Amino acid sequence: MDKFVVKGGVPLRGEIATGGAKNSALPALAATLLTDQPVNLQRIPRVRDVRTMQRLLVDIGASADVDGESVRIQVRVVRSPEAPYELVKTMRASSLVLGPLVARAGRARVSLPGGCAIGARPINLHLAGLEQLGAQIQQAHGYVEAVAPQGLRGATIRFERITVTGTEDLMMAAVLARGETVLQNAAREPEVTDLATLLGKMGAKIAGAGTSTIRIEGVEQLHGAEHSIIPDRIEAGTFLVAGAITAGDLTVTGCIPEHNAALINKLQAAGAEVTEVNTSTLRVRALTGLRSADVTTEEYPGFPTDLQAQYMALMTQAEGIAIINETIFENRFMHAQEMARMGANIRLEGHQAIVAGRKELTGAGVIASDLRASASLVLAALVARGETVIDRVYHIDRGYDKIEGKLAAVGAQIRRIE
């Protein structure tokens, strides 16, 4: 099992590039199930979750031609409309194939995602929506089985709460349904808009993506297309925090500044200088000492839960007391205990973390519990005195492509060991 060894205390300086968004690539890959023609996708990140999704598509019946960050997928025939547990147990996004499979093949059998380290991710909202579109749903033996032998029909669906994957799943199901589908209280994340853009290139009729109401007029069939995935706003945000926490001077390229507006506002409130160099480049500097700034996670365009752990690492180095409210997941403070091993002063009270800053962190052996917790521990290690060994970094490989290499190129003393 691989580990990271990090020696802290070095300000990061230089340019660091953002890759394609994992959370956009996964639904884009699932969307290839909606047509028998080839779909060419660029800027696909080479991370573990993406490789798992590609293997799943091949298992279903796709041919996949991978050339670096370019992927060509063609699903001429849906040979096996199933996502087996053994294949998708390490990936939370397996439910994204439900909608496309039911829409195209009339049936799907998908392993339930279940809970994970940061809390339960139930797909009841997906299933309720598919039933409103005319699918018959059964759950047994850890699987969801959905059938629609007569095809799907349009409906008005209002989500009880905002769900990104639910919005994406039902949007993909609705593009081949008869009539109009209206999704209300839909997720507004950039990844949802990116998926709608891809589906539009494939011949879908979608209006309102990026707002809370999305309208889809079903079509008989989709065709092939070419599409480039948007930059990963969470990776870009992680690098912005890395520049600030190390008191460095870091330029983050290949990003979309607007997608990180909530984080940028908090970094500036905490005393970091963040400037927009151009439409795809941000520069972060921490010219003076950081100060505490409270944050509450929210659905987009609010502060993303996927940057909460990284921000907590930053607040350990800020003057004062910061209160971090986690409203999306019920168990997303597991990194706090590991930071405490490094000397952080963090008190947990339910969905709230109280961080007393300006604490000198010291190197220690720590264990990553999930993807974003891994990133936060790397950030904490970058400023810790001495050497930190981070175990179970396979978590970070799920969503970051060779993060240790990117950080090392801008001065971090970090290496991977087996």
Image: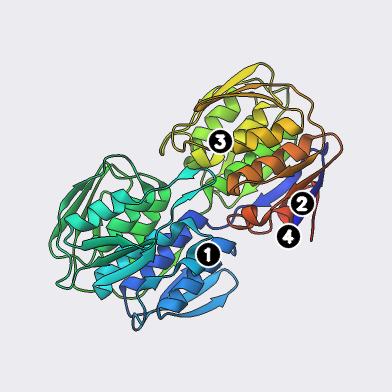
Residue 165 drawn at (x, y percent): 38, 52
Q: Give the residue number, with chain letter if any, for mark 1.
A: 50
Secondary structure beneath label 2: strand
Report the residue at 70% width, 34% height from top: 339
Report the residue at 69% width, 37% height from top: 338
In the image, is 145 to the left or to the right of 367?
Answer: left
Report the residue at 46% width, 72% height from top: 56
Circle 4 packing at 10 Å, graded few (<14), some (14-19), many (20+), is few
Q: Earlier in the sequence, mark 3 or mark 2?
A: 2
Circle 2 packing at 10 Å, graded few (<14), some (14-19), many (20+), is some
Question: What is the quadrant of the C terminus in the image?
Answer: bottom right
Q: Give the residue number, with chain letter if any, for mark 2.
A: 4
Q: Residue placed farthest to the top in the image?
A: 320
Q: Are marks 4 and 2 in contact (CB under 8 Å)?
A: no
Secondary structure beneath label 1: helix
Q: Give the residue number, with chain letter if any, for mark 3.
A: 308
Q: Are marks 3 and 2 in contact (CB under 8 Å)?
A: no
Q: Quadrant of residue 150?
A: bottom left
Give the amino acid type for the residue marked by disc 3 in the picture.
Gln
Circle 3 packing at 10 Å, graded few (<14), some (14-19), many (20+), is many
* Mark 3 or 4, closer to the camera: 4
Q: Earlier in the sequence, mark 3 or mark 1?
A: 1
Label 3 and label 1: CA atoms lie apart by 23 Å
Residue 1 circle label: 4
* Mark 1 or 4, closer to the camera: 4
